[in-house]
Image (cartoon, rainbow, N blue to C red):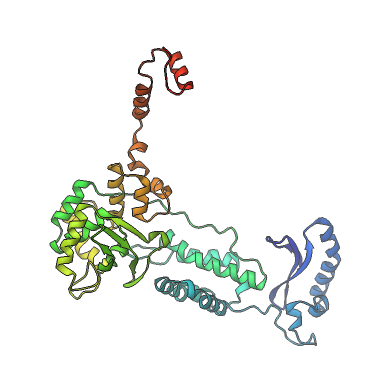
Amino acid sequence: MAKLSARKDTNKLYFDFSFDGRRCREKTNLIDTKINRRRLQKKLDQINAELLTGQFSYLGHFPSSKVALKLEQTEADKYDVTDMPLFVDFIDEWFAESIVKWRPSHLRNMLSMKNKYYLPSFSERTIDSITRADLLKFRTSLAKEPGRNGRLTLSNNRINKIMDPLRRVFEEAADRFDFNTPFVRIKPLKIEKTDVNPFSFEEVKKIVDKVRPDYSRYYLVRFLTGMRTGEVDGLKWKYVDFTNRLIKIRETIVAGTCDYTKNDFSQREISMSEPVFNALQEQHAASAGLSDYVFCNQTGSPVDHNNVTKRIWYPLLKRLGLEKRRPYQTRHTAATLWLASGESPEWIARQMGHSNTQMLFQVYSRFVPNLTRQDGSAFEKLLKNTFIECNSELDIKVAIKLGGECDE
């Protein structure tokens, strides 16, 4: 049966009906109002009557539509009323248009998702025939997929990352072919918040002292600069400025390939503390002639972080009796040590590659001394310094009003 519906973006009415086994939509230029619905009701009744008796003439009702213009002149012919591409064809076109803005590592990830998840589920269906129910079933099937690193199933975070590009594919297709995207009321799955679990200064010292000698400087730099794994692994000697004691973050290693940093804000200069400066000078003397990379293996290639994590990092933590934590906690450790020492949040945000201090306070709020103090001692100290000569509640009220000076 045909019905009248309204587009969410324009609020204009359109006819929505099924014909010849396909769903069809024909727009009007009328805004969705009671009066306009009554104006179109007679045509709607006629369409329904013809659909019911098998006498519906697409060309007769919509002679100037894109679909009707491609129909044969006789209604006896079999015609394609939707002219919609298959999902496989549209996603290939979308990929071709998007490659120019994707990094190589992101392209590899997108191709993997397309071939492993998208095409097996939707390949031979027309792009507009895929419904919200189909997408929900697809997401449910992802929840049964085996995960990585020993996980029995894919994490909610991974499922969201698979669903998000699919959302953009359907949004683009809906815009081009004038249909409503099926991605309605499909919210991302809830992701459990992972707590920041940094190392203490004593644990940092223990790790740097006890790790294999050829990795001691590597982990010291990680702990005291807050560099991401890809940034420290991709650090080259040309970006180490000993004169000004700066580490310039310009590249990162992703899937074994040097690439642009995570974002523009990640392009930054990190100040070298004295231990970092000394460690890099020692590393320069040991490996500068072997490779362009600061930290490399015996062949001069950058270190493989997965291999190092499995063979060096986790066994070391176990041997030292320390809680098992991902190497990324070295970045959190740097941030919390800076905060504990009283460094400016703005300076720390720049060192970390954050655009502002918002993320700093969101992630590390409990490590900020002024935020973790709950006894009001700072304000108490201010009051004592300001109202040291005030002897009554009235004096304090007057002093506050006068800017902190007591009447004699």
Left-right relation of 24 to 398: right
In this picture, is 219 found above or below 115?
above
In this picture, is 303 found above or below 394?
below
Left-right relation of 149 to 403: left
| Residue at x 24% of width, y 60% of height | 243
| Residue at x 59% of width, y 79% of height | 86
| Residue at x 34% of width, y 26% of height | 381
Camera sees residue 211: yes
User: In the image, residue 299 lies at what x, y percent?
Assistant: 19, 76
| Residue at x 65% of width, y 66% of height | 180
Which image quarter holds the C terminus?
A: top left
User: In the image, residue 32 lies at what x, y percent?
Assistant: 77, 59
**Viewer-closest of 63 and 278:** 278
User: In the image, residue 197 lies at what x, y percent?
Assistant: 30, 49
Left-right relation of 49 to 301: right
Instruction: Please give the count of numbered marks on the rendered protein.
Output: 0
Identify the image quadrant of residue 378: top left
**Viewer-closest of 373 and 166:** 373
User: In the image, residue 109 lies at what x, y percent?
Assistant: 42, 71
Camera sees residue 324: no
**Viewer-closest of 187 and 212:** 212
Which image quarter holds the N terminus?
A: bottom right
Identify the image quadrant of residue 61: bottom right
**Viewer-closest of 95 and 301:** 301
